[in-house]
Image: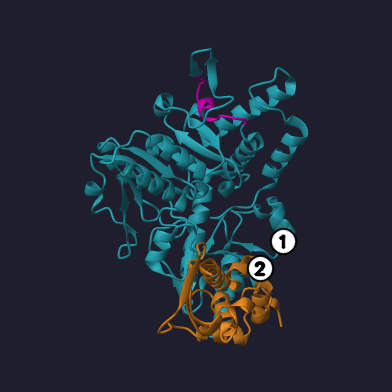
Chain colours: A cyan, B orange
């Protein structure tokens, strides 16, 4: 992919920077920054409220943002709920779907979950006394172990909530098989698409999940904006997550009717600039083409896996797994934090530690994992720099 | 020497490979643990305190070079000191013991050992 890096002001400001912490957050293209700035300079007003021109403009842009996101993930615009991010998305779903759950029920997640798709369910399980079941990661086959799927997901399973692409390993979950099994027992299905949405085209219709969450800042959008997709038929039946302004349809002395979708689930003044900024980010991706983005992620990941395989004393976790965009590694005898600090001295930004996904990290190592993760602006030269920096780590620590 | 070479100078790397006072005390009078959830570093400190003075000290630390070296130097400093004196120990003192430049994001590594120590002193004060 050509002419991408120069669209990112931060990368232009730091020409020597090799930014490989994209699974944590991506940099923002000029088009997103400009859209957000322009909104505050020329379009800012509250939405759905004023009769004046500015409010009309901001309301239109905000609604259009729903449509842009809907087109991007092959859904309907009234199925797109804006929130602060995937964490809010899963928390609201956990509260909502566990409201009437009894202690005989269970919820199923995987061992690869980010804490955002583990802690809300663990907390609900504690409060309600239901079981939290985990689809294990099999270190032999380097994939989720589906052998016990039919017993893990049974007629008492109410929710199956799974990460699409692991933020630690980049390993792709067999979502089709899991959703199919969940559907057979009538459980709700939730996909955490935080990583996958940045690397591959997503179709809610094809995935056939009930809900899907992701955060805007991991796909070149602003921080503080996220998306909760829900099937229209389900959202129509569900109670609102939060109550307040903007989500009420008809209010009389003794009755309240909820507003139409998606406003029913967007109480309070929304993050208007964030939503419009996220729509600009999606348009940036659509301009490149998600098929091209996917091809780039696959080929750069493959290049990195091969390059890392040739460095002695460096371990790539789940090295032969089917993966996307994420490279988890360690240097023998050096703690992950120290590796990341030496990388930083070479202007290479990576993440180290537990990655808010303790269960999967601990299943590999107690020392934390160094994670390099790629985006559309990365290229083979960035990976080459990473390899050179690994040699520096080994030299400094004499390993 | 560049910043990174200073941070990982030989003395730090030596302490990482062979930490001082690593292990357990036979009869500790006080102990406490701390961890850094984002990186998974764990540190457990054991003290034998008699008449308000630290007689023996040991630790088990699993962490990066900076946290392991930091805990080593801190625990070494505790021996033969009065608790009253140790009460005054501040972040800066530990950074001074390390004597290498520590970036903001690594402060929690460098200061890992202070947390169990403060907890021990707090417990002693509560008992008093």
Q: Position of residue B28 (x, y in %)?
A: 44, 80
Q: Which residue in the rendered view is the most extreme toward the right?
A: A41
Q: Is residue A260 magenta?
A: yes
Count of marks placed on residues = 2
The reply to whether residue B106 is visible in this rendering is: no
Name the residue at the front extreme: B128
The residue identified by callout 2 is: A347
What's the CA distance linking mark 1 and mark 2? 9 Å
Which chain hosts label 2? A
Q: Where is residue B79 in the image (x, y as percent from the top left)?
A: 56, 85
Residue at 47% x, 32% y: name it.
Answer: A75
Tell me what residue is drawn at x 67 percent, y 43 percent. A32
Q: Quadrant of residue A237?
A: top left
Residue stretch rendered in magenta on the structure: A258-269
Judge the density around disc 2: few (<14), some (14-19), many (≥20) Cα neighbours within 10 Å: some
Which chain is indicated by disc 1? A
Q: How crowded is mark 1: few (under 14 residues within 10 Å), some or many (20 or more)?
A: few
Q: x and y percent of residue A315 in the render? A: 44, 73
Decide which of tag 1 and tag 2 comes sooner along the chain: 1
- Residue A28 in the image: above or below residue A261: below
Of the pair A168 and B72, the residue shown nearer to us: B72
Q: Is residue A235 above or below residue B111?
A: above
Is residue A15 a member of the stretch shown in magenta? no
Q: For residue B52, which quarter of the picture? A: bottom right
Asked if marks 1 and 2 touch (Cβ < 8 Å), the reply is yes
Q: Where is residue A345 in the image (x, y as percent from the top left)?
A: 65, 72
Numbered mark located on residue A14 in the image: 1
- Label 1 secondary element: loop
Judged by its main secondary structure, the magenta piece is loop
Q: Is residue B72 above or below residue A371?
A: below
User: From the viewer's perspective, is A7 left or right of B117?
Assistant: right
């Amino acid at each position: 992919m050509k002419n991408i890096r120069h669209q990112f002001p931060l990368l232009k400001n730091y020409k020597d920077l090799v930014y490989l912490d994209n699974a944590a957050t991506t940099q923002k293209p000029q088009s997103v920054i400009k859209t957000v700035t322009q909104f505050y300079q020329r379009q800012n007003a509250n939405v759905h409220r004023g009769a004046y021109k500015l409010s009309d403009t901001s309301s239109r842009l905000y609604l259009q943002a729903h449509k842009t996101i809907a087109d991007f993930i092959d859904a309907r615009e009234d199925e797109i709920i804006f929130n602060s991010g995937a964490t809010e998305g899963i928390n609201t779903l956990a509260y909502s779907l566990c409201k009437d759950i009894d202690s005989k029920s269970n919820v199923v997640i995987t061992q690869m979950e980010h804490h955002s798709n583990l802690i809300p369910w663990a907390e609900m399980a504690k409060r309600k006394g239901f079981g939290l079941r985990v689809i294990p990661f099999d270190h032999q086959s380097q994939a989720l172990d589906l052998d016990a799927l039919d017993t893990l997901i049974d007629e008492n399973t109410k929710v199956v909530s799974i990460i699409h692409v692991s933020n630690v390993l980049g390993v792709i979950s067999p979502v089709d098989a899991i959703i199919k099994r969940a559907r057979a027992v009538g459980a709700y299905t939730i996909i955490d698409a935080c990583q996958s949405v940045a690397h591959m085209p997503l179709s809610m219709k094809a995935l056939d999940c009930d809900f899907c969450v992701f955060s805007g800042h991991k796909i070149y959008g602003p921080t503080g904006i996220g998306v909760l997709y829900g099937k229209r038929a389900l959202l129509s039946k569900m109670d609102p997550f939060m109550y307040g302004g903007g989500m009420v349809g008809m209010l009389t002395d003794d009755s309240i009717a909820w507003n139409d979708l998606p406003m029913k689930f967007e109480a309070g003044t929304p993050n208007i600039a964030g939503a419009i900024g996220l729509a600009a980010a999606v348009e940036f991706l659509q301009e490149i083409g998600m098929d091209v983005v996917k091809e780039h992620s696959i080929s750069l990941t493959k290049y990195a896996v091969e390059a890392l395989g040739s460095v002695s004393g460096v371990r790539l976790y789940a090295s032969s797994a089917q993966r996307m965009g994420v490279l988890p590694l360690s240097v023998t005898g050096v703690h992950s934090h120290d590796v990341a600090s030496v990388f930083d001295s070479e202007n290479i930004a990576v993440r180290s530690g537990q990655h808010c996904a303790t269960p999967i990290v601990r299943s590999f190592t107690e020392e934390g994992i160094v994670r390099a993760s790629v985006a559309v602006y990365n290229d083979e030269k960035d990976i080459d720099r990473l390899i050179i920096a690994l040699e520096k780590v080994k030299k400094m620590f004499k390993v | 020497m560049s910043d990174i070479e200073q941070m990982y100078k030989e003395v730090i790397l030596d302490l990482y490979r062979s930490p001082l006072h690593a292990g357990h005390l036979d009869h500790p009078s006080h102990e406490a643990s701390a961890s850094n959830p984002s990186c998974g570093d764990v540190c457990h400190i054991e003290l034998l305190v008699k008449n308000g003075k630290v007689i023996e000290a040991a630790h088990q630390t699993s962490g990066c070079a900076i946290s392991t070296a930091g805990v080593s130097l801190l625990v070494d400093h505790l021996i033969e000191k009065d608790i009253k004196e140790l009460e005054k120990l501040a972040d800066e003192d530990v950074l001074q013991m390390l004597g290498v430049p520590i970036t903001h994001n690594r402060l929690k590594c460098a200061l890992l050992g202070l947390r169990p120590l403060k907890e021990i002193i707090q417990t002693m004060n509560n008992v008093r």
